[in-house]
Amino acid sequence: MNSDSSPLPKSDSELNIDPWADPPRETATVEPIPTPLEIETPDLNQVVILNNSSSENEVTIWEQRVAQLQQQERMLKQQIASLQDSYTQQITEMQTAMSRVVQESLRDLEQRRQTLQLAVEQLERRQERIRQEMKTTFAGVSQDLAIRVQGFKDYLVGSLQDLATAAEQLDLVPQTDDSEMVEVREAKPAKNTSGNPQFAEQGFEDQARRIRQLLDQYRTRPDYYGPPWQLRRTFEPVHAERASQWFFTQGGKGALRSLGTRLQNILVASSIISVLTDLYDDRLRTLILANSPERLGEWRRGLQDCLGISRGDFGPEQGLVLFEAPEALAAKAERIVKEGDLPFIIIDETEDKISLSLLQFPLWLAFAPDPQFPSYSSDRY
């Protein structure tokens, strides 16, 4: 039965019923109520099929979603693993770089520490040397004064003896011609032409006086723009003491204790060369012995600086000559002696052995290492 075909109930106006009157009981009719069997119901099989198809679609969608999420999870894991590897590699590289930087910094600091230690040790040695020089300065000055007084005394005695001898030889007979005048000339000391100078002997007072005068001039009145072959550098009392010892105590041949650096030794040798050049002029030929070209180069530069000479003053036939072997130097010195000139031999501190063939010549100077301080090995000029 179709539910749409059932009659609808009529309104009160259509039924002509007075709403204020009592309803008549006899004429009232009641429409029949449809039974439940008359209600239209959907097909259950269709509903089950629809529900099954929708459930399968939803399961498929969720499976696809799960698969996508699993793929994203794998991708994220791969990315995380690659990032971890990259991070680990960067950390390793950074650690390696930091380790290398730290090692280099430590190495630089160690080198600086060693350099500072060497500088401190050198300063301490210099301080100790200055203290010793200060202790011995008064004694050295006193000895120098005593030598000067004794030399002046010897000069006065010799002059008085010469004056007495000259007075005995004078002709005291009066001259007939009053216009004649006796010309008195100052007696000049004869230039020493001997091949073996002896600065410490009594017969060389004038020469010794000239040596002291030059050393005092170098020490008190340095001339930094003087002529070539004259000392142009500051000359301290310790340098003058070494030069005086070589001239007057050792007589122009012997070894002097090193001053600690090659520059200081060159300064002392330059003062001696300057004095000998003033005494013997062109007859002096200076020969320098050192066991390496580097040390000979330092000697050449140092002598050029101290004496105001040029490279042209170094050569086999003039000025200064440099040697690495003592045999060649000895042969050259013998030729100089045969030519009538005077060889002056200078031996560097690094020469631990001196050839006996060099000791036969009248002028030689060797620098001996100071036992209290280590010898210099690579100090630059």
Image (spheres, rainbow, N blue to C red):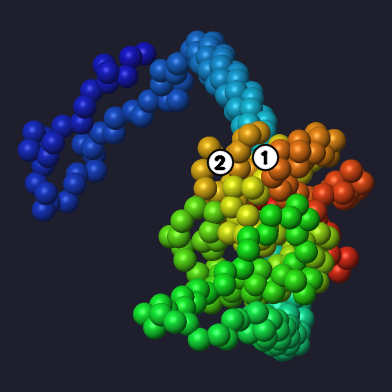
Q: CA distance from mark 1 to mark 2?
A: 9 Å
Disc 1 designates what residue?
Answer: 321
Q: Residues within 10 Å of mark 2 (few under 14, many from 20)?
A: some
Total count of labels? 2
Q: Residues within 10 Å of mark 1 (few under 14, many from 20)?
A: many
Asked if 167 appears above or below 280 in the picture, the reply is below
CB under 8 Å between discs 1 and 2: no
**Corner quadrant of residue 2:** top left
Q: Residue 123: horizontal and vertical position, in percent?
A: 70, 71
Asked if 55 appears above or below 207 in the picture, the reply is above
Q: Secondary structure at mark 2?
A: helix
Residue 287 visible from this viewpoint: no
Q: Is residue 171 or residue 88 the one in the foreground?
A: 171
Asked if 165 appears above or below 313 in the picture, the reply is below
Disc 2 designates what residue?
Answer: 313
Q: Residue 50: horizontal and vertical position, in percent?
A: 50, 13
Q: Residue 191: horizontal and vertical position, in percent?
A: 63, 60
Task: Residue at 83% x, 60% y: name it.
Answer: 254
Task: Residue at 76% x, 42% y: name it.
Answer: 337
Residue 307 visible from this viewpoint: yes
- Is the N terminus in the top left, top right, bottom left or bottom right quadrant? top left
The amino acid at mark 2 is Asp
Task: Residue at 38% x, 25% y: name it.
Answer: 34
Specify whether 38 is left or right of 155: left
The amino acid at mark 1 is Val
Q: Is residue 35 or residue 203 the one in the foreground?
A: 203
**Corner quadrant of residue 143:** bottom right
Q: Secondary structure at mark 1?
A: strand
Q: Is residue 51 or residue 204 the one in the foreground?
A: 204
Specify whether 200 is left or right of 156: right
Q: Tell me, for residue 134, which label it has, or none.
A: none
Task: Residue at 52% x, 74% y: name it.
Answer: 186
